[in-house]
Image: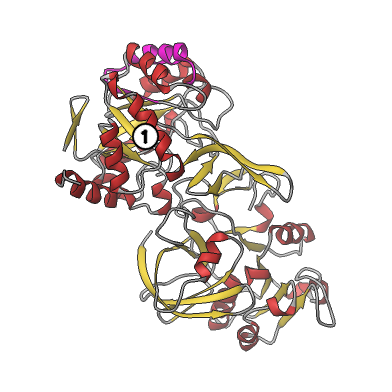
Amino acid sequence: MVEIFDIKFKNPVFIASGVFGFGLKYKSVTRGVGAIFTKGITLKPRVGNPPPRIYETPAGIINSVGLENPGVKEFCNSILPRLKKLNNRIFVNVAGFTIDEYAQIVEEIGEGVTGFELNVSCPNVKEGGVLFGQDPKMVGKIVRMVRKRTRRPIIVKLTANFCDPLKIGKACVDAGADGLSLINTIFGMAFDIKRKKPIITGGLSGPAIKPFALYCLHRLKDLKVPLIGMGGIMTGRDAYEFLLAGASAVAVGTALLRDPYAPLQIIKELEVLLQNKSV
Amino acid sequence: MIKHTVKILKKEWLSADIFSLEFNLPGLHPTPGQFFQVRINETFDPLLNRPISIADYEKTRVSMVIKVVGKGTELLSKKKVGEELIVYGPLGRRLKIENKNSLLIAGGIGVAPLFFLAKRLKRAWIDFTFVYGARNPSALVLKDEIEKLTSNVIFITETGGKKSGTALSVLSELNLTVYEIGYACGPKAMLKELQKLNLGFPIYAFCEDFLGCGCGLCLGCAIKYYGRYQRICEDGPVFELKGIEFDGGDI
């Protein structure tokens, strides 16, 4: 059991946004983790990017899904009620293309969820996304705007793409963010050497980025807000490293592509490590 | 998605770069086109599992026919009889087999799921013709097994032998008016070409792609089908060829 934002969570292992659908399929996993962060929700439905959307690199993957989602109305009507029945903590990942959109989405969803994760760091969309997340003034505006619309905890998901997450994190906290999650995927690219052309550009995730993610998180440890660490967590040991670096909880993403049950294994392994402090 | 730890019971090289693996998994009722996500190793490079279609399921035994095309399949080819393997599945939408005179068109390693289909058609007493093209005679695998299923079979290779060509180039030799349904599996170029031929009966393409999760969660394996993105792993992998928009979505 952990307590973050004055809310109790059954454990500190969460499901990261984007790689687990809406958590409605593997219910034992959704119920077993501390919280689920939904897929990114936008104001209007999005069909996502054309393929290829995924590419494997050494110890990582590059994805370019492009925030495919049914839009906030459909989410509220048909997905959220089913998600709530699973009786676990739900953070809705909110992706806007304008500052107003973030506030509109949060307002539409209302107070019936645990909290919100503001996605200001998606590298796979043309407008908004990571461009917002690289600018401290812009993220500050977004957080202030959303703060007025909800009493629920606001977590901002940070990028480390071409910016200092510490500066961005400070701006978020000053504007009223309750917590920060980091890091979102980092820019990545792969080439087809036969055609001499790029195959994909998108967000790199997985064990390949773990050392960088740990470093970024550790830089923010003095900000006095809860940090949710993520980036290549595949094992309980990985999760423990993030907790040692200053995280209050961790989120599992890419590991789910390899094994949808991975978070349950990570929880077990982490429990052993936390009980045996001499490790 | 059910996770299984299985023991490799049989491994056999069928050509220089194609091998088969067999393992026991009782109680499955797989249909042709369904596949397993196969764990390559316990380290994280390669990170993702590999989708491998079911080439046969007899009593309790699963057979997979795999071509070595990259690092993942290369590592998989090094597995030995007696070693354990983690597999997830069977995955993919179930195919309803129709009682219609069928034409099966396989290109290269696309033979694997169509062999499974041919076995099921034979079991259901449904007439079918099997056309199978490969690069060269040594790359034609499962030849004897296919011949045991039907005498309506055409093998063709691009090089070697008296006659050369592709699975599509021999279609003109067939009386296409007798077929009511077709099934195809092979390289994207073959499927694209086949779509253009417009044979006059519906053709179902068994699509293969690099998958992320393999179970409908990550939305990584999108294919544009009748104007909308579908997931190859969960909504497919079998789609009506007519509806696939090759320019709007890769496979």
Circle 1: element type? helix
Residue marked by disc 1: A214
Q: How is the image coloured?
A: secondary structure
- The residue at 18%/43% (across/down) is A274
Location of residue B91 (image quadrant): bottom left
Q: Is residue A163 above or below residue A87?
A: above
**Residue A171 sits above or below residue A52 on the image:** above
- Residue ID at (42%, 82%): B59
Q: Which residues are magenta?
A: A134-157
- Classify residue A171 by image quadrant: top left
The answer to whether residue A48 is seen in the rendering is no
B195 vs B63, left or right, is right
Expressed as whole percent of the image width and height from the top left, the position of residue A91 reads 32, 31
Residue A148 among magenta residues: yes
Q: Chain of mark 1?
A: A
In the figure, is residue A69 to the left or right of A2? right
Residue A168 picture location, percent across and down: 41, 18
Residue plotted at (37% across, 52% down): A260
Query: Does the magenta-highlighted stretch encompass residue B204?
Result: no
Q: Nearer the viewer, residue B222 or B97?
A: B222
* Res. A54 visible in picture: yes
How many residues crowd around disc 1 within 10 Å: few (fewer than 14), some, or many (20 or more)? many
